Amino acid sequence: MTEWKLRKEFSYSGNIVRYDVQGSGPPLVLVHGTPWSSFNWRHIIPALTQWWTVYFYDLLGYGQSEKRAGQDVSLGAQNQVLGALLEHWGLESPFIIGHDFGGTTVLRTHLLDNRDFQKMVLIDPVALAPWGSPFFAHVKKHLEAFEGLPAYLHEALVSAYVRGATYQPMIAETLSGIVKPWLDPLGQSAFYRQIQQADQYFTDEIEPKYSSITCPVLILWGEQDEWIPISKGRQLHAAIPTSEFYSIPNAGHLVQEDDPAILVSHLIKFLARQ
């Protein structure tokens, strides 16, 4: 597998955020979720760059972006990071796609920071209460114990956790690319830090505002998503007046890994439509 490498960097409050830009045409921004990175867009970027200039990055505290003790990597920080990147890139109303926490970040950036988007795509986003898991709750109670796990146990735990996000069996190269950023000592602390900082408050803050969205929105959901049930997608569709909703069969939470071809077909049809 070719090493996934982001070639550019941006300084946000003294922290390095790594990103890349490829393609030509109108601007399109990709925002990944947790515990993922821009690596998980690798199958769809080549198709999108034929039509759009694609901007993609690793969230602060994720992937190749900087990880350090004491960082605020919560959803309350990530919309600020996205806003700073949009300023850095000089983008006023791009197309934008967000997956999981990335979808939450897109919604927060639009609804709280008043950033305009030409069209929004939300893929299995964390958007409606209640959310979280017993694993998240356990990590929050015992953060130091998890940060201090022996490396081999940490790797086994992260690997088992992320495998549950796909419906199709996860191949070794995909698993390796997902877990690699979390395996060194900084990565191990960062993995549990982002879980510890996950808080439903950040979606409660914007949920009442969904009815005010006026730009076109496409909501896509893996029918076999065991992390966030598809019923949440239908509820979100009902809450956003300008939204369309499509389910993707034989796909779990990581639709972009389970069926990138079908995902790309939905994206191009929606984004290119006048």
Image (cartoon, rainbow, N blue to C red):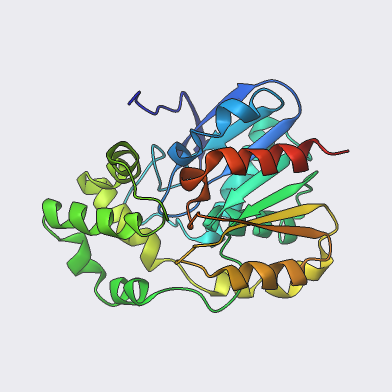
Where residue 187 appears, as percent x and y from the top left, is: 28, 47
Query: Residue furthest toward the right?
Result: 274
Question: Which quarter of the rendering shows the N terminus?
Answer: top left
Where residue 79 appears, as percent x and y from the top left, is: 60, 53
Reply above or below: 89 against 127: above
Residue 3 is left or right of residue 11, and the answer is left
Residue 206 in sight here:
no
Q: Residue at x 66, y 59 (%)?
A: 108
How many marks overall?
0
Residue in the foreground of this view, choosing between 238 and 167: 167
Q: Which residue is drawn at 67% across and 22% down?
A: 50
Where residue 27 appears, as percent x and y from the top left, is: 72, 31
Question: Which quarter of the rendering shows the C terminus?
Answer: top right
Residue in the foreground of this view, choosing between 182 and 123: 123
Q: Which residue is drawn at 46% across and 41% down?
A: 40
Residue 6 in sight here:
yes
Query: Residue furthest toward the front?
Result: 250
Residue 143 is left or right of residue 70, and the answer is left
Where residue 165 appears, as percent x and y from the top left, is: 41, 57
Q: Residue at x 29, y 47 (%)?
A: 182
Task: Report which quarter residue 266 is drawn in.
Answer: top right
